[in-house]
């Protein structure tokens, strides 16, 4: 079972702003599926062949995941550079671990994370 969504709501309101401002985390820029508001969510982003993989610490029901899947696109900012991402799709643990580089850290087993989001790099 992933982290509870209520903890994600605390992170979103308290810690995420500081993480974005620090510039130390990759930031996913996405659009709210109902509001149209632009959001900036700090995440671990793992570069994989042709795109990026995100560990769904709060599961596929997290707001940012639902926003990205609804829009079909997002932008990822790493070290001051922005890149376009598209074709969001949920992948299971086996596919995710095959795509991850050998030296990438895996989520701790006790979190029981089984869902990951993979997105492809797009031009523009």
Image (cartoon, rainbow, N blue to C red):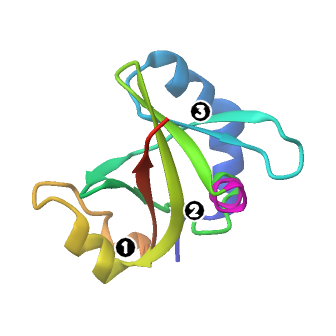
User: Callout 2: helix, strand or loop?
Assistant: loop
Please state if 95 lies on the left or on the right of 22 as rendered.
Answer: left
Q: How many marks?
A: 3
Q: Residues within 10 Å of mark 2 (few under 14, many from 20)?
A: many
Please state if 11 lies on the left or on the right of 50 as rendered.
Answer: right
User: Label 2 belongs to which residue?
Assistant: 58
In the image, which disc is placed on residue 110? 1
**Residues under labels 2 and 1: Cα distance?**
14 Å
**Residue 46 image offset from top left, x and y in percent:** 31, 50
User: Which residue is drawn at the image coordinates 72% and 61% (left, top)?
Assistant: 70
Q: Quadrant of residue 40?
A: top right
- Which one is in front in this view, the residue at disc 2 or the one at disc 1? 2
Instruction: Report the magenta stretch's main SS.
Output: helix
The reply to whether dot 3 and dot 2 touch (C-beta < 8 Å) is no
Q: Earlier in the sequence, mark 2 or mark 1?
A: 2
Q: Is residue 114 visible?
A: no
User: Callout 1: helix, strand or loop?
Assistant: helix
**Residue 116 image offset from top left, x and y in percent:** 44, 68
Q: Which residues are magenta?
A: 65-71
User: Which residue is drawn at the image coordinates 30% and 55% (left, top)?
Assistant: 50
**Residues under labels 3 and 2: Cα distance?**
14 Å
**Residue 112 image offset from top left, x and y in percent:** 42, 77
């Amino acid at each position: 079972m992933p982290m509870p969504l209520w903890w994600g709501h605390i992170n979103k309101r308290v810690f995420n702003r500081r993480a974005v401002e620090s510039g130390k985390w990759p930031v996913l820029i996405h659009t709210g599926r109902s509001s149209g508001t632009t959001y900036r969510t700090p995440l671990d982003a793992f570069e994989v062949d042709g795109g990026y993989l995100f560990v769904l610490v709060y599961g596929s029901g997290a707001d940012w995941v639902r926003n990205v899947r609804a829009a079909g696109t997002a932008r990822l900012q790493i070290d001051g550079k922005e890149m376009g991402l598209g074709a969001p799709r949920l992948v299971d643990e086996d596919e995710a671990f095959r795509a991850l580089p050998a030296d990438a850290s895996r989520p701790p087993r006790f979190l029981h994370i089984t869902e990951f989001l993979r997105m492809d790099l797009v031009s523009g």
